[in-house]
């Protein structure tokens, strides 16, 4: 936790950025790099019938850490993906409640 779902980028691009990104995000969240999952979702845009690849969009699912951490987190993701030549990068956050999140059947909060 946090879980990051990427769309509109290739798995190879994510692999290129993942280690450095995890290190930056770990500093922001004050946790280890092994706390993150980063998954690349294949999507095909159907808008206009062109079948183009979707724009870069990252959904972050996490326990709330405040607006400063959220802004730093989004900026780190955007900067890493921009280094890959991507633009118009969007980041959205989904917040879990600790008492509603279970690991091995046990609530976190």
Image (spheres, helix red, strand yellow):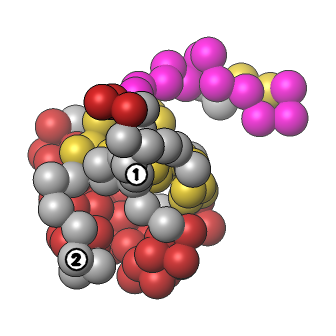
> At x 85% / y 26%, what residue is drawn?
105
Q: Which mark is residue 63?
A: none
Asked which secondary structure carries label 1, the reply is: loop
Above or below for 20 versus 11:
below
Q: Earlier in the sequence, mark 1 or mark 2?
A: 1
> At x 49% / y 66%, what residue is drawn?
10
- Residue 19 x %, y %: 48, 80
Asked if the residue at tag 2 contacts the one at tag 1, i.e. Cβ–Cβ closer than 8 Å, the answer is no
Asked whether 98 falls inside the magenta stretch, the response is: yes
- Residue 58 x %, y %: 37, 47
Q: Which residues are magenta?
A: 94-105
Q: Which mark is residue 53?
A: 1
Give the Cα distance between marks 1 and 2: 15 Å
User: Could you say which is closer to the camera, residue 38 or residue 87?
Assistant: 87
Asked whether 76 falls inside the magenta stretch, the response is: no
Above or below for 5 versus 45:
below
Asked which secondary structure carries label 2, the reply is: loop
Of the two numbered discs 1 and 2 in the rendering, the one whose residue sits closer to the viewer: 1
> At x 36% / y 65%, what residue is drawn?
25
Q: Which quadrant holds the C terminus? A: top right
> At x 62% / y 16%, what residue is drawn?
100
User: Could you say which is closer to the camera, residue 32 or residue 10?
Assistant: 10
Say whether residue 85 is left or right of residue 107: left
Rendered image quadrant of residue 86: bottom left
- Residue 14 x %, y %: 48, 71
| Residue 72 appears in the picture as rendered | no
Q: Which mark is residue 85?
A: 2
Q: How many marks?
A: 2
Rendered image quadrant of residue 22: bottom left
| Residue 86 appears in the picture as rendered | yes
């Amino acid at each position: 936790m946090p879980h990051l779902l990427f769309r509109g980028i290739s798995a190879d691009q994510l692999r290129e950025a993942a280690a450095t990104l995890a290190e930056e995000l770990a500093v922001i969240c004050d946790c280890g790099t092994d706390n993150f999952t980063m998954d690349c979702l294949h999507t095909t845009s159907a808008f206009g019938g062109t079948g183009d690849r979707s724009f870069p969009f990252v959904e972050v699912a996490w326990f709330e850490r405040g607006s400063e951490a959220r802004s730093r987190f989004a900026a780190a993701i955007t900067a890493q993906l921009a280094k890959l030549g991507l633009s118009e990068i969007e980041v959205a956050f989904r917040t879990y409640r600790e008492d509603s999140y279970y690991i091995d059947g046990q609530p976190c909060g």
